[in-house]
Amino acid sequence: MEVGMISKTWAMLAAVGALTLGAMGTAAAATDKAAVLKTYGDIAQAVFEDSVTTAKALKAAVDKLVAEPSPANLLAARTAWAAARVPYMQSEAYRFGNAIVDDWEGKVNSWPLDEGLIDYVAPSYGTQSDENDYYTANIIANKDLKACDDTDASTITEDLLQNLQGAGEVDANVATGYHAIEFLLWGQDLNGTGPGAGNRPWTDYAKGDACTNGNCDRRGAYLTVATKLLVDDLEWMAKQWQPEGQARKELAAKGPDGGIGTILTGLGSLSYGELGGERTKLGLILHDPEEEHDCFSDNTHNSHYFDVLGIINVYNARYTRVDGKVVTGPALADLVREADAKLAAEVDAKLLATNAAATAIKLKAEGGEHYDQLIGAGNAEGNGLVQKLVDTLTDQTKSFERIITALKLTPIQFEGSDSLDNPSAVAK
């Protein structure tokens, strides 16, 4: 299977199952809001536990690559990285409303990143940045980061990487998480909006004279440490969603209506400001491949698809785990159906439309035309596919806003995005 083609049949069936559940309904009597919040927490626990499981599989593949560098082991590590993204991206509907998730998220999923902080880069990258003193720090090549407060990088440790995450208060200084690992596995994607992903050679991890681009031992150490940190960070979040975990306690403290508001805050903010705006519309306005989420691996179509699936999961309270087991129960969809059947049908239809738009992009990429090509200037068909996803995400957000009124909740402010709210400013 080509790297980036992640369980297509399973994914499609999971989405159809969740959407069918929403259309059919599960509630015979008035749905208990506390029960809805319990299901919401159970799904969070499951999705983060699955994220841990797949991250551990990634770590095992990385350990084998570093111990026994080869083309096959590099491919296996890349495949494991892409598989690890599947459950994690479905967790993003828990951001925004849950401060414990949103405050933590940057450790594992910050993007975009300035690659020169971590490793060697192409000459086209440049040698300095007025905004970032760490732009070409190259942790892997330099044991003393003299341009960066004389940071001691003689040994690549967890503390070093954690301290460099967001160094100098620059968000692009990403030293940990999925995208740092992605860069170390694929390298820069130098193809612009043309075909092709990053093409780091396996020999960047080779032993002795076979090593390319120098510092193969430190590169392996960085990759190993970063992957262990990812597992540790995900384990911490999975623990917070255990029945007596802090995330569940914070959710319960908001009360039934406050908890339902939290669910909607996550759904609306991910739909509109984050996925509809920052991750799709911005790149489309700028036609800039640097604005695609999984830019080194050309896996962005999957990241967007599984974000959409995560929204569907939470709304309908149905999550298919990586082992095929299903976690389900009373849902926000049930509350909406009881309050306003017409609105419930509207939401179901809009979720179907968004899923179809995300699926079209996924299938296009799996057919050979990836996301960075789709947003390229002059690609009318590709631009249209991405704009369709923006439109459906925006449209479903309007229905989420109507749910707030239907359930008589305190008004909620969803995350916005200049890309949607003030596109002329972004274009400048």
Image (tube, grey):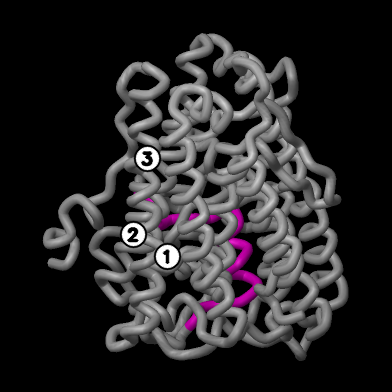
Q: Name the mark on residue 391.
A: 2
Question: What separation in Å lies between label 3 and label 2 (alpha carbons)?
Answer: 13 Å
* Residue 4 horizontal/vertical position (percent): 65, 73
Pick whichever, 171 or 128, lies toward us: 171
> Is 187 in the magenta?
yes
Residue denoted by label 1: 114
Numbered disc total = 3
SS class, disc 2:
helix
Labelled pair 3, 2 in contact (Cβ < 8 Å): no
Identified at 30% across, 22% down, the residue is 411
SS class, disc 1:
loop
SS class, disc 3:
helix
Residue denoted by label 3: 399
Q: Which residues are magenta?
A: 170-189
> First in sequence: mark 1 or mark 3?
1
Question: What separation in Å lies between label 2 and label 1 (alpha carbons)?
Answer: 30 Å
